[in-house]
Image (cartoon, rainbow, N blue to C red):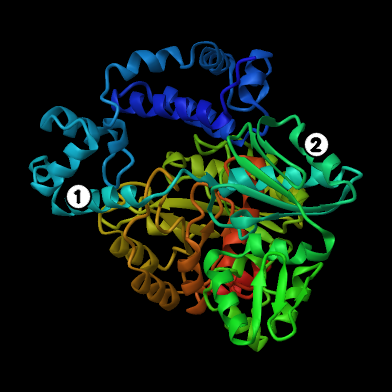
Amino acid sequence: MVALPANADVAGQFELLADIFELESVDGFRVLAYRRAATRIRETGTSIARLALDGKAKELQGIGKTIEEKIVQIVEDGEVHALTKHKQLVPPEVVQFMRLPGLGPKTARRIWHELDVTTLEGLREAAESERLRTLSGLGAKTEENVLRALAEREEEGPARALLGVALPAVLAAGEELRAHPAAVKVSEAGSVRRRRETVRDVDIIATARDPDALIAYFTELPWVVEVVAKGGTKATVVSGHGLRFDLRVVPPECYGNLLQHFTGSKEHNLAMREEAQRRGLSISEYGVLVTETGETVTHEGEQALYEFLGYELIPPELRENAGELEAARAGSLPKLVELRHLKGDLHAHTTWSADGHSTLEEMAVAAIARGYEYLAVTDHSHYLRDGRMEAQDAEIDALNRRLAPFRLLKGVEVNIRADASLDVADEVLAQRDWVVASIHAAFQRSPTERVCAAMENPHVDCIGHLTARKIGRRPGAAIEPGQVIETAAATRTALEINSQPDRLDMPDPLARAAGEAGVFVPVASDAHRTAALDYVGLGIGQARRAWLTKKHVLNTRSWAQIEKMLR
């Protein structure tokens, strides 16, 4: 039987086709449809190829009959037919230009046609020889950004999966393993347990009454598309997402030791080992050797291990050797924020935005089901012109009367233009409950100055996705953290952690600095459909990595409390 393509490979073809169509200035609707399909395919746990062959892929949101037919083309012929055709018209590396800062499809096309540059190496030479600045609109800053981004590409390691793809997959796998009668303890480990924004492989640690039975069950789960290795205590499989899962079934007496070993970062574990050695102890994944007596002490749980070594239990998200060992030794670790602390969401979209998929009422009902007291409706400002904002307000008023005490907040997401102005008049912003200002274009054009100017506006409550990065596709803007955080603190402007899987923006080092400076940090979903409200779980993971407590996270408060704080 021919192996079916992984979901990530299928999604990659649709993303490449969208990129090429953008370069060719093809109908924007088709570009958007392919990008939405790629996102849905990456998020799907089962094999999208199998679903398409069975005629069931089109039942997924964002996957219509035409997309399903193209997936079948990939299965049968290896590639979408349209991609095969259009790839011949565009040099392959020109597509990569679009993934560099400041080079959108129009600029990439101009570099290709006007400078006859068709490779990344050619682009580097054009930047180094100052040829890019010969094109109108490009300058020395563009060349500097291109050279920096090309250097960063060379330093990148193997491809990593988004946390938003890996985390749901590993949590589901853990539930399936716990349901087996042989399982005793099961936990995710590795970078996914530390909630890093991207992960390479997925680690699961377990104990079992019958290890062979649990491993056999694991390798035969329906989402497994390849069994890479299978032994008495370990198995490695690949999922439809293209994720590599490593399951280790360990003796119960050293479960805590192995779980800690496979969760902590290399730097965290090394620092802990070095400190232990100074105290006459030697740490391995199987136990702690007391050098003086020759005794190896094992631990069934992580808390017992950390306490034996003289530490508080360190939350997985903090195990990065960023001061957590010293704090744990002193008993001064923060009590980190938890998902259950959120009382509302301060960034969400509806069908009033062209890119929204759920109505106001659907979003409100979903927010109520999550236990929220409020939801800020922050549709994009350019979709709310010509009386549409007033019409949306009327619908919000009607829903609030019906759904009280739950409240939909009349918000808006405004664009910070390249000249640092906002695309909505101050008198309009003054009437909104909650205003999010975000950079959506010209990302490398004075981003720090533009963000700070927006925060100086008394009607702006929050900066959305501060660096505007798209993980794996677009690097963040060159924000000057100190200046931005200082301005945010002075103007009492919030800086959000945007929980979209490909954003997770602010990155956790920035969020930690913001929290330490007393800046308000909402954890927001930026949901464009009801299911995406769940993304806040990813954002909370980043908040915890940033050492943020309930006090730091703005939307752990009621709306009345937030209004009072902002005033």
Q: Nearer the viewer, residue 325 or 88?
A: 325
**CB atoms of marks 2 and 1 within 8 Å:** no
Camera sees residue 486: yes
Camera sees residue 550: no
With respect to residue 423, does 293 lie above or below? below
Q: Quadrant of the N terminus?
A: top right
Binning the other alpha carbons within 10 Å of mark 2 as few (below 14), some (14 to 19) or many (20 upward) gives some
With respect to residue 424, does 28 lie above or below? above
With respect to residue 145, does 486 lie above or below? below
Q: Nearer the viewer, residue 281 or 438?
A: 281
| Image mark for residue 256 | none
Gap in angstroms between the C-alphas marked 2 and 1: 54 Å
Element carrying mark 1: helix
The kind of residue tagged 1 is Thr
| Image mark for residue 216 | 2
Res 32 quadrant in image:
top left
User: Percent position (x, y) of residue 289?
Assistant: 70, 76
The kind of residue tagged 2 is Ala
- Which residue is located at x 44 percent, y 64 percent? 459
In this view, the mark in front (2 or 1): 2
User: Percent position (x, y) of residue 298?
Assistant: 78, 71
Left or right: where 74 falls relative to 130:
right
User: Percent position (x, y) of residue 283?
Assistant: 65, 73
Q: Nearer the viewer, residue 44 or 364?
A: 44
Element carrying mark 2: helix
Residue annotated with mark 1: 142
Q: Count the marks.
A: 2
Left or right: where 146 falls relative to 203:
left
Binning the other alpha carbons within 10 Å of mark 1 as few (below 14), some (14 to 19) or many (20 upward) gives many
With respect to residue 64, does 360 lie above or below? below
Res 21 quadrant in image:
top left
